[in-house]
Image: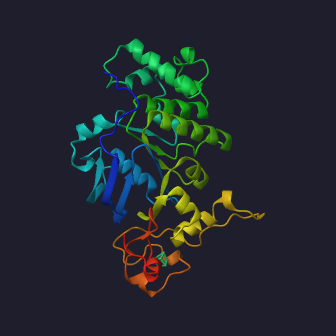
Amino acid sequence: MRREDPISHTTSRPLEIRGLDLDFGTPRGRIHALRNISLDVPAGQVVGIVGESGSGKSTLAYAVLGLLPENADVTAGSIVFEGRDLLKMSAPARRSLLGDRLSMIFQDPMTALNPVRTIQSQMIDIQHHEQSSRSEKRGRAIDMLNRVGIPDPQSRIAAYPHHFSGGMRQRICIAMALLVRPALLIADEPTTALDATLEVQIIHLLKDLQKEIGCSILFVSHHLGVVAELCDRVAVMYAGEVVEQGAVRDIFHNPAHPYTRALLECDPGRIRKKTRTLPTIPGEVPSLLGGKRGCIFRQRCPQAFNRCAQENPVEYRIGVDQVARCHLLGEERLIPA
Ligand code: SF4
């Protein structure tokens, strides 16, 4: 039977990640790609993950989807989705969630769509969990294409992916991802390959459909403006750790972690003075090979002090709904979260 909208979620937090550690085995040693990640995606909310390249944003998204390479090894923690720990489920049980309760949109729509099959056959196949006829599934696919702004969907549904522009292909991917009415949609940099105008259109479309369907979204992006526009909450990642998280308005107006502040200062959308060169954060993301002691950001942090090289900072709560990992917050006598 087809589910009726809006979806009733079994929990107020469809996704709860706790203490997640993930390594990649390489010939040079183990890369500690994710360390002690704890993150919630509440029902009906959009949670952004931001950070520089190499911060672990996409690795985290792929860990939730169960689409990691064979050399990935989760060494601690849990990923609880609708009350079940995904890490304890069998591979077939996990696969059965994909394209049903859990859906995704990737950066490059061409890698998500099968180039030798029509949009129609792909949109009908993705509804394999539904007990309805082919013509009903086709009707729903046309309806969804119409909602994402594909002109003349009745005839265009018979076309192949290469008959569409990049922006239209990403609209089709959004239509496919939401057609199954997932509880959680994971979007990995879905607008990065698009120009600025298309990016705005896609973000508004995603926001409207998310509200209509009532799903949650985990939205990976390096574009802070897009995150501010779309998301309710944001987690800031640096070198495999979540260094700060909270409501978007708090993080953007009152960042507590030196890395979050540096990231915001480098956002082209927030620079008010005329400049020929965009600011960058001095230094580089450190290698994640081998064990680490102290704060992972200390080589680039303008406020680092002795303790930062000795101890890994714990999470401190700032206000009601914001936490950050920085020893300075302990010096301000904030209470660990
Ligand atoms: Fe900077 Fe130290 Fe805070 Fe790390 S713990 S962000 S190095 S002040």
Give the total number of marks visible in the rendering.
Answer: 0
The figure's colour scheme reads rainbow
Q: At 74% across and 63% down in the image, what residue appears?
A: 272
Q: Quadrant of residue 306?
A: bottom left
Residue 268 higher or lower than 306, as above or below = above
Q: Is residue 120 visible?
A: yes
Residue 20 higher or lower than 149, as above or below = below
The quadrant of the picture occupied by the C terminus is bottom left
Work out which residue is located at the far bottom of the displayed protein and give it.
Answer: 306
Q: At 72% across and 64% down in the image, what residue appears?
A: 277
> Which of the pair 95/73 is nearer the observer?
95
The quadrant of the picture occupied by the N terminus is top left
Is residue 183 found left or right of 160 in the rendered image? left
Residue 195 x/y as whole percent: 65, 42
Q: At 64% across and 38% down in the image, what residue appears?
A: 198
Residue 247 x/y as whole percent: 49, 57
Residue 13 higher or lower than 245, as above or below = above
Is residue 163 found left or right of 64 in the rendered image? right
Residue 292 x/y as whole percent: 36, 74
Q: At 37% across and 80% down in the image, what residue appears?
A: 311
> Which of the pair 113/267 is nearer the observer?
267
Work out which residue is located at the far right of the displayed protein and give it.
Answer: 274
Residue 328 higher or lower than 289, as above or below = below
Residue 301 x/y as whole percent: 53, 76
> Which of the pair 35/166 is nearer the observer?
35
Q: Is residue 68 visible?
A: no
